[in-house]
Amino acid sequence: MPSLSRAQLLIQQQRFDLAERELRGLLVEDPDQAELHSLLAVCMLQEESRWMEATEEAQIAVGLEPDSPFVHYMLGRVYLVRNRLTEARGAAAEAIGLDPYDADYFGLVAEIELNDRKWQAALDASLSGLSIDAENELCSNIRSIALERLGRSNEALQSARETLSRSPESSLSHVSFGWAALNSGNYKQAQESFREALRLDPTSEPARDGMIYALNNRSFIFRFVYRFYAWIGRFAGKYQFAMIFGAWVVIQILSKLDDANPAMRVVTLPITLAYFLFVLLTWIATPLFNTFLRFHSFGRHLLNRKEIWASNLMAVCIITAFVAGGTTIATSGATGVGVFGYWILMMIPVAATFQQSTPKRTLVFASAATIIALLPVYGIVRCLIEQSPAPMSGVLSMFGWSLLGIQIASGFAASMPVRK
């Protein structure tokens, strides 16, 4: 006969197909046992195509035992996976209202706040959980992550080290310590932690992402850009936008001053060039360095299909740009300079396209990138038809504004939650 303990053990071992079989056998005997429906929801969550089924099972459990904190907790976990944070908060609040002495319920709240980038709220919830159970693994790890996000790197590293000492066989503990080490500047130690996390759980996406960043941090240029990512990521989305927009306004003011007083060009030109180089790097750094990661013995196995496509297109842009640049130097021609600039700038819409989190958004940005890519071609055709270079000026202006537009649109899309 199927047993509940066996099903729970199979879930712990991540053998969800066998666990589901056990649970369905138990439900034949007792279809009104709420816990079975909650555990069945956990099994269904492993496949995105079954997330709606998982939600229905979790809701059935709540309907059967509305006074059980566990079933509300599991419903909250289902909503969290689907990134429906408002509903997840409601379910977690119900669980805590029914049982305010279970650290796992506060761990769920902390995880929700972490996903919503509310770092202080995540820290507060994790500390509430740790006040109940000082060794709760989830609360301990979220405390470390939240401390780092709040800029308290030394505390984060110490917290992560303590948690890891208690749970050396936990992939999540190694992931938390890896991110704390990485954001403290110790990318070699981070590599060791992420490697161990992947050994313990080869399916861990946070460990895979962390290992990619840790390997790319071998480059001084990437470390510089990554430190900017880590710093600005500590702010809410509206403040990030304000800072980026403010920097752009400053550059526009410098440009106007440069036009009014050419003598200032010796000051304004280096600042403007440094700004545009930095902006370019912030957009293309990750897919660009992932291209080099393809030649790393371990790193090349970390990239997923989407990242491989992005790195392939980046390689095309880089190779074509430098072939054009080399041709210009060899022939003393001016055309190659324009071709070089075109392919370097095309890395921006390529990066924007592959940063999208859903297939629909990726398709929209791929279409926009294609249109942007064809603008200079359109300008050349108009020049040939009209036998004049005049149309190219307007087209190049449109090309520049389109590049700025796709960056803004991509940033806006990234700030929008993806609910499933």
Image (cartoon, rainbow, N blue to C red):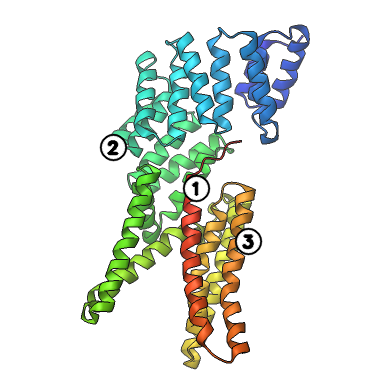
Which of discs 2 and 1 lies nearer the camera? The answer is 1
Which residue appears at 58% of the width and 9% of the height? 66
Task: Provide residue 233's location: percent of width, then percent of height.
Answer: 38, 45
**Kind of residue at disc 1:** Ala
User: Residue 189, located in which quarter of the rendered image?
Assistant: top left
Q: Which residue is mark 3?
A: 367
- Residue in the image at 39% along x and 29% along y: 122
Camera sees residue 164 = no
Q: CA distance from mark 3 to mark 1?
A: 17 Å
x and y percent of residue 293 in the render?
Answer: 52, 58
How far apart are the two marked residues, 2 and 1, measured between alpha carbons? 25 Å
Looking at the rendered structure, the kind of residue marked 3 is Ser
Determine the residue positioned at 43% across, 49% down: 214
| Most foreground residue, 123 or 304 | 123
**Sequence order check, earlier mark of 2 and 1:** 2
Left or right of 189 in this view: 322: right
Residue where numbered disc 1 is placed: 414
Q: CA distance from mark 3 to mark 2?
A: 42 Å
Where, quadrant-wise, is the C terminus in this rendering?
Answer: top right
Residue 318 at x, y percent in the picture? 52, 71
At a point 60% along the width and 78% down the height, the residue shown is: 377
